[in-house]
Structures are given as C-alpha cells and as structure tokens.
Amino acid sequence: MIKTKLLQLCVAVLCVSGFISCQTQQARTELNMNTDWAFRRGDTDGGERGDMNDAHWIPTTLPHIMQLEKKHC
C-alpha cells in the first residue's frame, strides 16, 4: 500500500513538472541556413576562413547534388 501511494505521488510530481516546463518554454526559432552557399570542385587553401574570396564559385542551394558536374576522379 505504501509503495502504491509513493508511486502515485511520483507520477503526480512528474506530470506537474512536465506541465510547468511545457508552459515556460519559448517558441521555437527557425533559422534559414539555405543562403549564401557556393560550390567549387577540389581543395581550397584557407577554405575555412570567413573572409575567403569565393566570388568565382558556383552559387548553390541546399541540398546540393553534383549530378550535373563531371565525374570526380
């Protein structure tokens, strides 16, 4: 009997805490990450830098497939 009451108390606490956490969550923020992508076949020295000049690269969107590109050797 004590185990049953303890179990009921635990379930009630979990339900109430779940309800409270649902009420306090903020709305989800959606980010559009499908902007300003470019494609270039091959390696690029310094490609990790944010100030790299990629003006001659092919603009693309995500997901990008190389279907129209030449076969990679």
Image (tube, grey):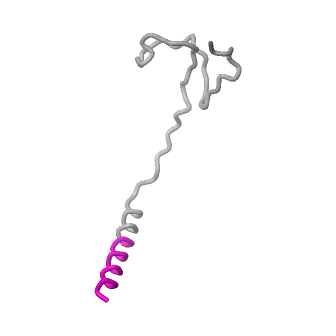
Relative to 64, 21 lies left or right: left
Give the extent of the magenta segment: 1-16
Q: Which residue, as the protein is rendered here, is positioned at the far right?
A: 68
Q: In the image, what residue occupies the spot 53% across and 37% down? A: 32
The residue at 39%/67% (across/down) is: 18
The N terminus sits in image quarter: bottom left
Q: Main secondary structure of the magenta part?
A: helix
Between 61 and 23, the residue placed more toward the observer is 61
Residue 54 coordinates in the image, percent (x, y): 52, 13
Residue 35 falls in image quadrant: top right
Image point (55%, 13%), residue name: 42
Left or right of 16 in this view: 70: right
Front residue of this view, candidates 49 and 6: 6
Residue at (34% x, 79% y) in the render = 7
Query: Is 10 part of what is drawn in magenta?
Result: yes
Image coords of residue 23 (percent x, y): 40, 64
Q: Residue furthest bottom?
A: 1
Quarter of the image for residue 8 reads bottom left
Q: Is residue 15 above or below residue 47?
A: below
Measured from the top left, where is residue 24 in percent x and y?
37, 61
Magenta stretch: residue 15 in it? Answer: yes
The quadrant the C terminus occupies is top right
* Image height of 6 relative to 36, above or below: below
Count of numbered circles on the image: 0
